[in-house]
């Protein structure tokens, strides 16, 4: 029993350390690609939700080309992305409820409500314009040697910088004041509630695993079941370690912290060699157009996620923790992605589909592409260190 | 250090604010403290667990205690 309690405290209740979690995500994303033949991504599915909603309210989407690209086949229960996202939500719920981390958190001001919704829309629009959010670009696009992902990522960092500048304006600052105190606060503690939450988290977790096993062994749809299991693991990891891609790059500018950005680069480095091995064994990589859409989309996405305070996977775990702010971000993401689908046909040829799909492994040869990717990752690493140093220099000159 | 023996000088109650504002505001507030004074930060942004302690240490402050046993997290940081 003691062993179980120790395990429960350390692995189910407490937060996990972010660095190993990000590397685990890199490894899992690689295996996901190997087994599923597709990449770990969420925004495509959000776009399909938007499509289903439009159909439901009677809008004819058959003439919208973007829905052909994301493929509206079936529904959330019959698509790999669909069941993966359901699994992810279950993983997030288990993490939050096990860890006594559920609380209805209302936005502190109307400015934040505006930020969540508008930022969410901009990020959702940008992500789909660039053919996928940070997951598709950072964790799957770059390790898949698609040049578009590099364009998206670099533009995203510029967008994140602009977003960090804008959200640092006095208008967006917290209005909270320092209080003089003489005693630290007693935090509320309700053992019964903690237990109830824990049981609920366990029920959701077990039910989802059983559902996945059913899909694999009884319904004879093993791919769907495996995708769901992957989703649970992805959800647990991002929620338990509080992985936030937005903060990873934003906080290099806002508070000079680079630990997460570097963790993500390491995760990408791990994923790159793994994906490479699958590709040389014959798994076709997913390569997208290296056009202006990736650059513009990346910038909008970077700006939007900082304004909103979270990206397309970050809102998922925060929403189930009861952060109302991120319910709005999620809604904004779906609206933004759907808007993009509406206007896509007006400019898709000129800024996206007429541009070449550049696969670094074809342009530079297998090993040339592999090494080019590692050189680029190293340069990205150096860039992050340089930005962190800039912050420290500024801090020192301010103090002097 | 057990947290009930720590006596904070100021409190910053940031409940409801999403990240990065709790971390940004913490650093701002720490600047106004005198050396030795202690700030208590109350934040219900779970992600602050990955930013407030690290930012405080990076800026040369001492993290005395973190209580993340519930959805509302308490940090005690000394200048």
Image (spheres, rainbow, N blue to C red):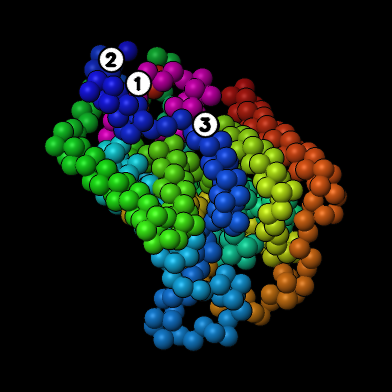
Q: Residue at x 28, y 18 (%)?
A: B3
Residue A200 on the magenta segment: no
Q: Position of residue A15 (x, y in %)?
A: 38, 32
In this figure, which residue is indicated by the disc labeled 3?
A20
Residue that numbered label 2 is attached to: B2
The chain carrying label 3 is: A
Whole-number angstrom distance, CA of label 1 to CA of label 3: 23 Å
SS state under label 3: helix
Q: Residue at x 54, y 64 (%)?
A: A44
Residue annotated with mark 1: B65
Q: Residues within 10 Å of mark 2 (few under 14, many from 20)?
A: few
Q: Chain under label 2?
A: B
Q: Is residue B59 magenta?
A: yes
| Real-space CA distance between mark 1 and mark 2, rounded to the nearest whole angstrom | 8 Å
- Circle 3 packing at 10 Å, graded few (<14), some (14-19), many (20+), is some
Could you tell me if the residues under marks 1 and 2 are in contact, i.e. CB atoms within 8 Å? yes
Marks 1 and 3 in Cβ contact (< 8 Å): no
For the residue labelled by badge 2, is the local secondary structure a helix, a strand or a loop?
Answer: loop
Q: Is circle 1 on the same chain as circle 2?
A: yes
Give above or below for A199 relative to A297.
above
Which structural element holds mark 1? strand
Residues rendered magenta in the picture: B48-73
Considering depth in this image, is B34 or A251 the residue closer to the camera? Answer: A251
Q: CA distance from mark 3 to mark 2?
A: 28 Å
Where residue A300 appears, as percent x and y from the top left, is: 61, 60
Mark 3 vs mark 2: give the one in front: 3
Closest to the observer, B76 or B38: B76
Left or right relative to A27: residue A183: left
Identified at 70% across, 57% down, the residue is: A284
Name the quarter where the N terminus of chain A is drawn.
Answer: top left
């Amino acid at each position: 029993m003691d062993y179980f309690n120790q395990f429960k405290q350390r692995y189910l209740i407490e937060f996990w350390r972010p660095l190993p979690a990000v590397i685990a995500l890199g490894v899992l994303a690689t295996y996901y690609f190997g087994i599923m033949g597709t990449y770990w991504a969420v925004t495509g599915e959000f776009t399909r939700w938007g499509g289903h909603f439009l159909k439901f309210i009677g809008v004819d989407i058959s003439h919208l080309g973007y829905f052909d690209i994301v493929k509206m086949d079936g529904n959330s229960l019959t698509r790999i992305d669909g069941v993966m996202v359901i699994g992810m939500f279950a993983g997030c719920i288990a993490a939050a409820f096990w860890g006594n981390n559920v609380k209805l958190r209302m936005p502190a001001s109307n400015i934040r409500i505006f930020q969540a919704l508008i930022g969410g829309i901009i990020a959702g629009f940008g992500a789909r314009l660039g053919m996928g959010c940070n997951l598709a670009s950072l964790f799957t696009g770059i390790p898949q040697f698609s040049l578009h992902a590099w364009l998206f990522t670099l533009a995203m960092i510029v967008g994140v910088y602009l977003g960090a500048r804008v959200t640092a304006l006095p208008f967006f600052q917290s209005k909270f004041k320092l209080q003089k105190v003489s005693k630290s606060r007693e935090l509320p503690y309700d053992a019964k509630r903690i237990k109830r939450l824990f049981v609920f988290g366990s029920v959701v977790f077990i039910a989802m695993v059983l559902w996945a096993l059913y899909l694999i062994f009884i319904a004879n749809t093993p791919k769907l079941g495996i995708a769901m299991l992957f989703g649970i693991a992805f959800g647990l990891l991002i929620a338990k370690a509080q992985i936030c891609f937005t903060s990873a790059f934003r906080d290099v500018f806002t508070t000079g912290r680079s630990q997460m950005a570097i963790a993500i680069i390491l995760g990408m480095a791990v994923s790159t060699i793994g994906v490479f091995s699958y590709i040389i064994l014959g798994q076709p990589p997913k390569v997208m157009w290296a056009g202006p859409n990736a650059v513009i989309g990346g910038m909008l996405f970077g700006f939007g996620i900082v304004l909103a305070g979270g990206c397309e996977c970050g809102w998922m775990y925060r929403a189930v923790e009861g952060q109302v702010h991120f319910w709005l971000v999620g809604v904004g993401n779906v609206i933004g992605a759907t808007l993009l689908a509406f206007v896509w046909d007006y400019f898709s040829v000129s800024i996206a589909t007429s541009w070449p799909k550049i696969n670094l492994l074809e342009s530079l040869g297998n090993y040339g592409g592999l090494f080019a990717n590692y050189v680029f990752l190293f340069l990205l690493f150096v860039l992050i260190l340089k930005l962190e140093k800039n912050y420290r220099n500024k801090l020192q000159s301010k103090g002097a | 250090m057990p947290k009930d023996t720590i006596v904070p000088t100021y409190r910053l109650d940031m409940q409801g604010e999403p990240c990065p504002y709790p971390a940004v505001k913490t650093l701002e507030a720490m600047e106004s403290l005198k050396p030795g004074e202690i700030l208590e930060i109350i934040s219900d942004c779970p992600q602050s667990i990955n930013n407030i302690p690290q930012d405080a240490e990076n800026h040369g402050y001492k993290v005395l205690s973190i209580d993340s046993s519930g959805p509302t997290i308490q940090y005690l940081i000394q200048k």
